[in-house]
Amino acid sequence: MASKSSDVRPKITLACTECKERNYITKKNRRNDPDRLEMSKFCPRCRTHQPHRETR
């Protein structure tokens, strides 16, 4: 069985750039997206669409 550190599709957490709340959990492909992921998502705390970045 492969170890979690070398997993091709690891689970990542997306945090709001404004309030820093961690709102979303998703998976990404490390081969296609080696950099940190950034997506525009709805933040329930800010109550607007904000950019969410991948956190460690």
Image (cartoon, rainbow, N blue to C red):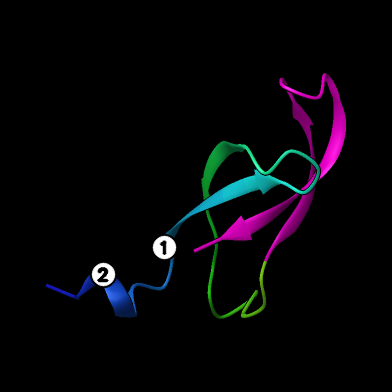
Q: Are marks 2 and 1 in contact (CB under 8 Å)?
A: yes
Residue 22: percent from the left, percent from the top? 57, 40
Label 1 sits on residue: 10
- The answer to whether residue 21 is left or right of residue 11 is right
Residue 6: percent from the left, percent from the top? 32, 80
Pick the residue in front: 10 or 19: 19
Mark 2 burial class by Cα count in 10 Å: few <14, some 14-19, many 20+:
few
- The answer to whether residue 50 is left or right of residue 54 is right
Most common SS among magenta residues: strand
Residue type, label 1: Pro
Label 2 sits on residue: 4
Residue 15: percent from the left, percent from the top? 64, 46
Magenta extent: 37-56
The kind of secondary structure element at disc 2 is: helix
Question: What residue sits 65% from the left and 74% below the top?
Answer: 33
Location of residue 20 (image quadrant) = top right
Query: Is 50 placed above or below 17 here?
Result: above
